[in-house]
């Protein structure tokens, strides 16, 4: 079983999707830690209910960003984590800390990267008049939402769509996409070898796994 930790700042529906896949026997992982920068995060309550160890650290208790990140990631390392999943973790992580997790950390982001890194992705998609929206899972690098994309899920954008309708439809796709990517890593199909490799070949275009 691949040892997985999840960092989340909010509701935790992507964490819930991972736990559900694991419980259904579809994900050969052990969830070793759920960490958050927000003690009130729904993700922490979900983890407690699933008997996964939790950790909440408050950034205000640290003098600067690197100190907080070093503390948080020291806990992640101590948990024996082999794969770190950022699922709605809404902080930029210190570059030196991220570098230590190269190839071992992935993030899910609600846009078809490289389009719309950062916030308000649904709004920006609508404002641009895009006919398609989507979600991406990428390996984490120091660049915000900028690491190599390994898989994407797509949805059409219709004339009646709003930020809320896009967010809702896309979230359902995220809940398939993220467990599919974690499963591919847990089964050894998706690996990092200085670059993302799927079934022994470099990932040259985003995979469609879900
Ligand atoms: C998800 O839509 C995820 O893609 C997004 O936050 C939401 C978390 O929802 N992540 C980002 O925007 C990261 N840049 P959840 O807490 O219900 O999983």
Image (cartoon, helix red, strand yellow):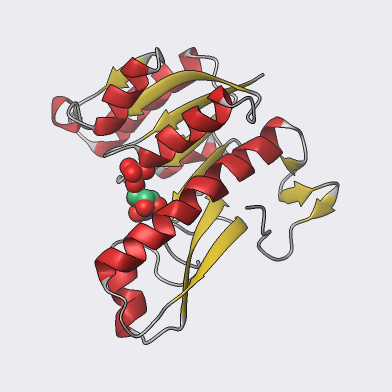
Q: From where the camera sits, is residue 142 visible?
A: no
Outermost residue toward the left in this view? 60
Residue at 44%, 53% (x, y): give it. Answer: 172
The image shows residue 139 at horizontal and vertical percentages of 57, 48
- Decide which of 160, 110 is in the foreground and name it: 160
Residue 109, quarter of the rendered image:
bottom left
The image shows residue 170 at horizontal and vertical percentages of 42, 60
Asked if residue 115 is positioned above or below residue 17 in the image, the reply reads below
- Decide which of 8, 118 is in the foreground and name it: 8
The image shows residue 186 at horizontal and vertical percentages of 68, 31
Residue 128, quarter of the rendered image:
bottom left
The quadrant in which the N terminus is found is: top right
Left or right of 1, for residue 8: left
Left or right of 199, for residue 86: left
Q: From where the camera sits, is residue 50 visible?
A: yes
Asked if residue 116 is positioned above or below residue 76 in the image, the reply reads below
């Amino acid at each position: 079983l691949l040892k997985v930790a999840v960092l989340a700042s909010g509701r935790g529906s992507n964490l819930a999707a991972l736990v559900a896949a694991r419980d259904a026997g579809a994900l050969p992982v052990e969830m070793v830690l759920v960490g958050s920068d927000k003690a009130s995060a729904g993700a922490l309550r979900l983890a407690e209910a699933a008997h996964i160890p939790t950790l909440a650290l408050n950034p205000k208790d640290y003098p600067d960003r690197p100190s907080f990140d070093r503390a948080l990631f020291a806990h992640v390392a101590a948990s024996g984590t082999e794969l770190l999943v950022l699922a709605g973790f809404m902080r930029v992580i210190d570059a030196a800390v991220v570098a230590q997790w190269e190839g071992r950390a992935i993030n899910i982001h609600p846009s078809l990267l490289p389009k719309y890194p950062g916030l308000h992705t649904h709004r920006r998609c609508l404002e641009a008049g895009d006919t398609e929206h989507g979600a991406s899972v990428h390996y984490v690098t120091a660049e915000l939402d900028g690491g190599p994309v390994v898989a994407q899920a797509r949805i059409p954008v219709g004339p009646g769509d709003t930020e809320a309708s896009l967010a809702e439809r896309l979230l359902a796709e995220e809940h398939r996409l993220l467990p599919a990517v974690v499963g591919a890593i847990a089964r050894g199909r998706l690996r990092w070898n200085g670059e993302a490799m799927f079934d022994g070949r470099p990932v040259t275009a985003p995979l469609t796994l879900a």
